[in-house]
Image (cartoon, rainbow, N blue to C red):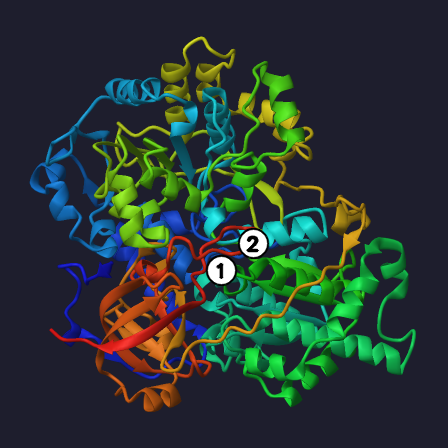
Amino acid sequence: MVSKAPVDDVGDEALVVGPPKEYAAGLPAVAWSLRHAGRQMGVRRSLLTLVQVNQKKGFDCPGCAWPEPDHRSAAEFCENGAKAVAEEATVRRVGADFFAAHPVAELADKSDYWLGQQGRLTEPMYLAEGASHYAPISWEDAFDVVAEELAALDSPDEAAFYTSGRTSNEAAFVYQLFVRAFGTNNLPDCSNMCHESSGSALTQTLGVGKGSVSLQDLYKADLIFVVGQNPGTNHPRMLSALEKAKQAGAAIVSVNPLPEAGLLRFKNPQKVSGMLGAGTELTDEFAQIRVNGDLALFRALNRLLLEAEDAAPGTVLDRAFIDEHAHGFDEFAADVRTTSWDDVLEATGLAREQIERIHGRVLGAKRIVVCWAMGLTQHKNSVPTIREVVNFLLLRGNVGRPGAGVCPVRGHSNVQGDRTMGIYEKPSKEFLDALEQEFGFAPPREHGHDVVDAIRAMRDDAVKVFVAMGGNFVSATPDTAATEAAMRATRLTVQVSTKLNRSHAVTGRRALILPTLGRTEKDQFVTVEDSMSAVHMSRGKLPPASPRLRSEVAIVCGLAERVLGERVSVPWGEFARDYDLIRDRIERVIPGFTDFNRRVREPGGFVLPHGPRDERRFPTTTGKANFSRNDLAVLRVPAGRLILQTVRSHDQYNTTIYGLDDRYRGIKQGRRVIFVNPTDLAELGIADGSLVDLISEWHDGTERRADAFRVVSYDTAKGCCAAYFPETNVLIPLDSTADESNTPTSKSITIRLHPHTH
């Protein structure tokens, strides 16, 4: 299994490596935002579009799910948000002429960057069995192709229906309704690959698989942990919130294997002082932890808290909270007291003195928030790690208190809303009962396939039709060679998309591309849910990129009418004509959406209820917040090996590549680089700047290879290295997943470096 550089990638000789930046944003971010937007949209279109981003009467940014503050600036977007908008609102177009000139085999040799830069898709396209090129097809004929293949299946479970996080609440609701009316719960989605571990751990411990904090809680916090996260690139508007919290007196502890520019210093581009001044130092304590050492760190902090309580009874732990609201404390405490300091220091790579210093900050803080992202969620032991974070917060009553709580920072714009709407392969009995009562059909009750299981099922010929509502499934998933082989084994692949990506070039025997409206374009208003459970409207302002585009809602409803016919009594046509009717049904099926149509029209929308946050009510199996026992397994690798974590560049959002630079890490004109600690390079006898192949090792003896990566000596935790995805997804075994959540372990892969020979 080998990954080679696409034929169109910038040559190795063009790569430039400079020193990493010591701050994020500032005037360069403004300049790069405007430059990128101008190239894609033109100056006038850029200005008219960007002023609508994240405004109460505008459209929600198609990038990250970070919430908007109550009082918004005229430019309520970040650099990567501007790039996301520009990519969608580009004036470049991909129509029938493009596909006639480029056979699918040629497109398969292109990089995701090249494919994305071609522009917006303009009309439905069809790849017939045995054909070399996509050709135009009418919407009606496209729906007929899907209906024909679905009707030929022996079981509805031989189809899988994927969802990307950019899908609106309304589209997600009718999509899952269509899929369940068809007869399956095969609804894999992008959450399976990122925050599934968070949802699993939080549901077990707190009863709600979402974060418990608001922006106001961040502003009121005394201490904020930012763990396994790079907000400067992945959620840049979070830096403004951290700056405000810092100015209000909060201290920030950053826990990460790499120093990230945004957490070192932030120059707020929405302030003159931010653009021209020195900016704000955000991090008070940087813990440069080894990959996968986070569980050990929080176990150590929890042991220290118990010992501090022993030394001064009644002054450290919140015994009133524990006694009234928590379950399992004694078992947890007995276990965590056995924590070995030798194991902690080996797992974390930190000095005991630093851990004790962080503990001192904890003792001095009454209100603590812990934020995290994929640095915690993509390991074999991710669920236990996040449960240990919850233990840490429960010990001092830091759940359901203003200024405190759990803050999993979601990625894609409506990924949390999609799950709320029922995009889940393991729906609850309560949700299915409500769906059955409202729509009068019996939805399937057996659990369906998540992302990894869907790939396995396609590989094993158990899933024969694959439908994707947005996203770039092939590039986003692990074990690239296995995933591509699985996709090519299907009878039909269907991609509902705004732009070209690799998933259009890796197809089943037949393939459809169904082009859809973007967030920026005129349609009825839709709604989204941000990372902090606020639901608000989004309405695009631009004319559609083509008159042949349809909205996601219209595409789903058209498919449902054609596939299901009279099998269920659902007014698909009415839903497509009036989204208010969809919201009326959402209100009757999903708790928290009472008076949906009225409340979402209020400025800023509304916040969904959250029992632990609102009432210290914990809907768990015990009826209380659950302490847990979490084994500490030190991640050890053989001599001569490193632990690889996959990361994004600054010119990237998920699998969308905006450019070939990573400005904050000092990389220009290239992506096939690997960041390695200089001490490790010396021990391995590898020179900085040399060319190597990356070889991952799996316990079954198989190896996976990614060729031709430039070594960059970098300040990473010793024994750890980092490289960009999707280029390194080929190294992640399909069966290497997190316990309980089945999330790919993209942040802890054992690799060795081998000299590259041309």
Tell me which corner region of the image, top left, top right, bottom left or bottom right, holds residue 646: bottom left
**Who is closer to the viewer here, 328 or 667?**
328
Q: Quarter holding the C terminus?
A: bottom left
Check disc 2 and report the residue beneath it: 197
Q: Residue at x 55, y 30 (%)?
A: 446
Observer-nearest of 556 and 317? 317
Residue type at the position of mark 1? Gln
Q: Is mark 2 on a helix, strand or loop?
A: helix
Q: Is residue 514 visible?
A: no
Q: Name the residue under label 1.
A: 378
Q: Are marks 2 and 1 in contact (CB under 8 Å)?
A: yes
Where is residue 29? Give x, y as percent. Answer: 39, 68
Q: Nearer the viewer, residue 753 or 32?
A: 753
Q: Where is residue 414 in the image (x, y as percent from the top left)?
A: 50, 44
- Rendering coords of residue 654 (x, y %): 39, 55
- Residue at 69 percent across and 30 percent down: it is 594
The residue type indicated by label 2 comes to Ser
Work out which quarter of the rendered image holds the N terminus and state it: bottom left
Secondary structure beneath label 1 = loop
